[in-house]
Amino acid sequence: MSIENITAEKKKVADSLPIFAEHDSPSVRSYTALKDNDLLPLLRSVKSGCAGMQRNITTNNGSPCRLFGGGSVRFLPLSDAISQGLMRPEDIFSENYDKLSAINQGYFNDGFYLGVPENYQSDKMINVLHTGDRDFNVRNLYSIGNNSSAKILENFVVTGNSSVSHGTVIKVGENSSLDYFLLEDEENTELSYLERTIVMGRYSTLRIHHLSLPGKKSISRFRTIQVGEHAESWYYGAALGKKKEHLDLEVYTDHRAIHGKNNTAFKGILGGSSSLIFRGFIKIGEKAFKVESLLLANLLLLTKEAAGNALPVLEIFNGEVKAKHGESVSNISEEELTYLMSRGLDLRTAKKAVIEGFISPIIYPLPEDISRKYLQIVEEVIGND
């Protein structure tokens, strides 16, 4: 089936779905206010193209810029990857989670294929920079071959009060490992929808490091699907709200095979009048025996105007599993500040120490230059309050 035929069907679904649907389950209930006008830029976005060659693997408004192939790592447009037999058209699609997901899959107009071959072993980071200054709606495929070990860093820098929809399917092959770093800098977006669907093979491992600076309305979805036995995944995420940003984040782990393991840990720091809803979802299927899955989420509110909520959802369909969750929403303790200030710290420095201690478990594993940049943003959050 061609991409055109599949997208035609996806468009029908997207057009038929309401913006909001009433559900009993908090895992699918809508928490972000959307209007028809919010979605129009995603329905009308057009292919952009790139001006000139770039130094790194770069996209501009969703269009792949620096193209290369024939080496170990392949980076090329979807149409070229299909014609060369590197992927099938259906590989870039997933189930429709909601209207925004359907719009991304039915109305995308560009995208690329990033392929890591079998038996690839390298500690070198594969850097992908996404830039944008206008509305765009794209979909991509990352393919990690069997028996490989790779590190991928994605960095978003979006300006111009744009509306952005960015969906990617990531396939991790058997006996392979992927360290995936995703840095969202979308402070200037009107609406941002980001979706990552990761499909894991037998004995594969996945580590996601996700840092978010949300825009006015940011909706992010991570769906990890363990289809192979003995798959192991980790999600370490953090988000910072400084002014009036809103982030709607869902982290969903779907265990479909035996002996799977998962660890989800999220930290949110909210200043100004920013808001955040975190939904952690663990699903363990009927045949997914001997699974171990953990979900933790902690939100720290720095002002009275900031708002946060953490919702855990566990769906377990067999009795031979270990699963647990823990969530908290709190303010900085006056006792902590008093203690630190009694040791000679001023109020600002004491706040910084508390916040850095709160977020350090998430950013500590990151490369030094990334963690240093994020700590600088923590200073901005404190400065705004």
Image (cartoon, helix red, strand yellow):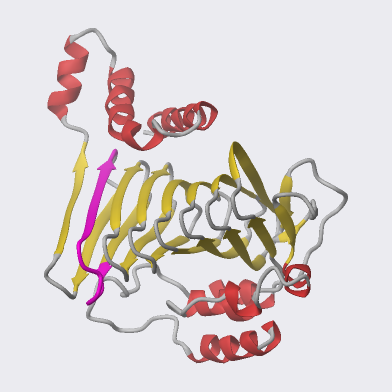
| Residue at x-position 27% and y-position 66% | 258
Q: Which image quadrant is residue 83 in? A: bottom right
Residue 253 is situated, as x and y percent measured from the top left of the image, at: 33, 63
User: Seen in the image, is 202 located left or right of residue 146?
Assistant: left
Q: Which residues are magenta?
A: 283-302
User: Seen in the image, is 226 located left or right of residue 124?
Assistant: left
Residue 134 is situated, as x and y percent measured from the top left of the image, at: 70, 60
Res. 306 visible in picture: no
Residue 369 is situated, as x and y percent measured from the top left of the image, at: 54, 27
Q: Depth check: 138 or 245 in front?
A: 138
Res. 112 visible in picture: yes
| Residue at x-position 64% and y-position 43% | 127
| Residue at x-position 37% and y-position 43% | 272
Q: Is residue 284 rendered magenta in the image?
A: yes
Q: Depth check: 38 or 359 in front?
A: 359
Residue placed furthest toward the right: 52
Q: Quadrant of the C terminus?
A: top left
Residue placed furthest toward the top: 344
In the displayed structure, 348 sits above or below 112; it is above
In the displayed structure, 185 sits above or below 217; it is above
Q: Which image quadrant is residue 238 in? A: top left
Residue 277 is situated, as x and y percent measured from the top left of the image, at: 32, 58
Q: Is residue 152 rendered magenta in the image?
A: no
User: Seen in the image, is 246 located left or right of residue 148?
Assistant: left
User: Seen in the image, is 18 located left or right of residue 105?
Assistant: left
